[in-house]
Amino acid sequence: MHSAARPADQAMPLVARKSSGIRGRARVPGDKSVSHRSMLIGLLTVGRTEIEGLLEGEDVIATSHACAALGGTIQRQAPGNWIVYGVGISSLLEPLRPLDFGNAGTGARLAMGVIAGHPIIATFDGDESLRRRPMRRVLDPLARMGAVIVDEKEGGRLPVRMKGARDPIPIVFESPVPSAQVKSAVLLCGLSAPGETTVIEKEATRDHTERMLAYFGADIKTEPYGVHGRKIRLKGRPELQPKKILVPADPSSAAFPLVAALIVPGSDLILESVLANPLRYGLVDTLRKMGGNIEEISRIDSAGEPVVDLRIRHSQLKGIDVPPERAPSMIDEYPVLAVAASFAEGETRMRGLKELRVKESDRLAAVAAGLKANGVEHEIDGDDLIVRGRGRVRGGGTVVTHMDHRIAMSFLIMGLASEKEVAVDDASFVATSFPGFAELMRGLGAEIR
Ligand code: S3P
């Protein structure tokens, strides 16, 4: 089966070349994590959830189709403005066809959590990239909660057929991997369980599920655990109250114009309404330590999340050591950080990047190959990536993107400041998370064609 979210065989090569300044104001599309959650949690409320600023990328659209197949009524009122009429906890319908999540790990894993808490059978599938990604990390705790994995490909790969639990069991789950998707799947299943579900994470990961559930009225409590961790306790079977959700701009998408402005001489850029959740803000903290001129020109609280406007100016960066405990707060930003590090003076060591190997591609390998193709000295040492920056990049390479949107965008950003142009073999997957990326960048002065 081919993924319904995208026709096969439509590679879209793109080339980026030296540009003379990234200037102006922009608002990148809505946050992917918040968008997926607003659909799925909206589905579990009774009534009307209004969403403003939803990311209309292929990943979230796939989740919206899944929500409709589970009984929700989903309406698009205007660009970015969507309504979800939910059915409430315990009232999902059994989907008639396999649920196709396309390229989206978040959609698939969070939906597994939701369905595991309902007595229905569903088949989960996705594109070639998603079919390669590990699902055991989610299926194992959900099986402990009572879900039955009827069928799966070797090693817990998609397609997976699951029968959810009629009476899910609340568990205490200590996550073996730092993953917000795993944590969220357990919590979403815990919504249907009687009593208290507890998730312990040794390293705190993005907490949008916890914030949104609290915002919708669930009894959910978070306390520190160890040095970098958290313990989350959720009381099951709450009556979630639908509310309006304002989706801020995605910091993981803002990362691309942000790094472009830092590395392209003559840049002066304002990025509006960027989500500044501390568990998503690692890139800004890191780039500042590298000497990046990033100024917060406003900060507000928006529906339970901090949101900032940022002004970024061209800066000469210097190499630094990035500690492993920062990884969860910038896990999706390492490819573009590696690009920034290539233009820095000196060595940048990014520690503890094991999880990068199981993203939309093996991102550690894909980044290393892209750096090599463009003449950047680097090394992989265990789970660390070391980039030896020389203040400038030769470029001239063609980067293989492996169906990975962030690999495509990162190396296009590299091409905006390198001596020779940088090509990517396929930028079509950019539409999964950042529709309009090339157009937005061109509007700011980027030479991408
Ligand atoms: C996400 C969690 C992260 C991240 C992904 C979005 C989420 O994945 O890489 O893009 O919305 O929960 P992991 O949970 O696998 O770390």
Image (spheres, rainbow, N blue to C red):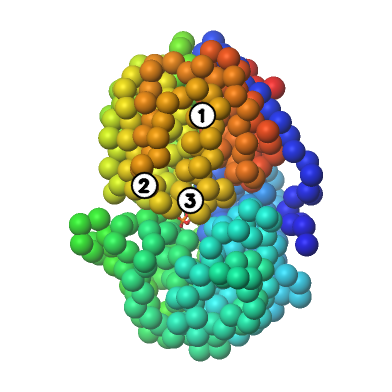
Instruction: Judge: label 2 CB < 8 Å from ligand 1.
Output: no
Q: Position of residue 62 (x, y in %)?
A: 67, 57
Mark 3 is on which residue type?
A: Arg
- Which residue in the structure is indicated by mark 3? 357
Question: Which residue: 60% across, 41% down?
Answer: 405
- Give the structural element (helix, strand or loop) at label 3: helix
Instruction: Judge: label 3 CB < 8 Å from ligand 1.
Output: no
Q: Nearer the viewer, residue 322 or 85?
A: 322
In the image, which disc is placed on residue 295?
Answer: none
Q: Position of residue 344 (x, y in %)?
A: 37, 21
- Give the structural element (helix, strand or loop) at label 2: loop
Q: Nearer the viewer, residue 323 or 256?
A: 323
Question: Which residue: 51% across, 89% down?
Answer: 167
Q: Quadrant of the rendered structure where residue 216 is? A: bottom left
Q: Are marks 3 and 1 in contact (CB under 8 Å)?
A: no
Asked if residue 212 is positioned above or below residue 165 in the image, the reply reads above
Mark 2 is on which residue type?
A: Gly
Asked if residue 419 is positioned above or below residue 239 in the image, the reply reads above
Crowd around label 2: few <14 · some 14–19 · many ≥20 (10 Å) = few
In which quadrant is the C terminus drawn?
top right
- Taking the view exactly as shown, the residue that stands out farthest to the left is 227
- Which residue in the structure is indicated by mark 2? 382
Q: Position of residue 74 (x, y in %)?
A: 69, 61
Spatial distance from mark 1 to mark 2, Cα to Cα?
Answer: 18 Å
Spatial distance from mark 3 to mark 1, Cα to Cα?
Answer: 18 Å
In which quadrant is the N terminus drawn?
bottom right
Mark 1 is on which residue type?
A: Lys
- Disc with the residue nearer the chain's start (3 vs 2): 3
Looking at the image, residue 427 sits to the left or right of residue 341; the answer is right
- Which residue in the structure is indicated by mark 1? 372
Question: Which residue: 39% across, 62% down?
Answer: 177
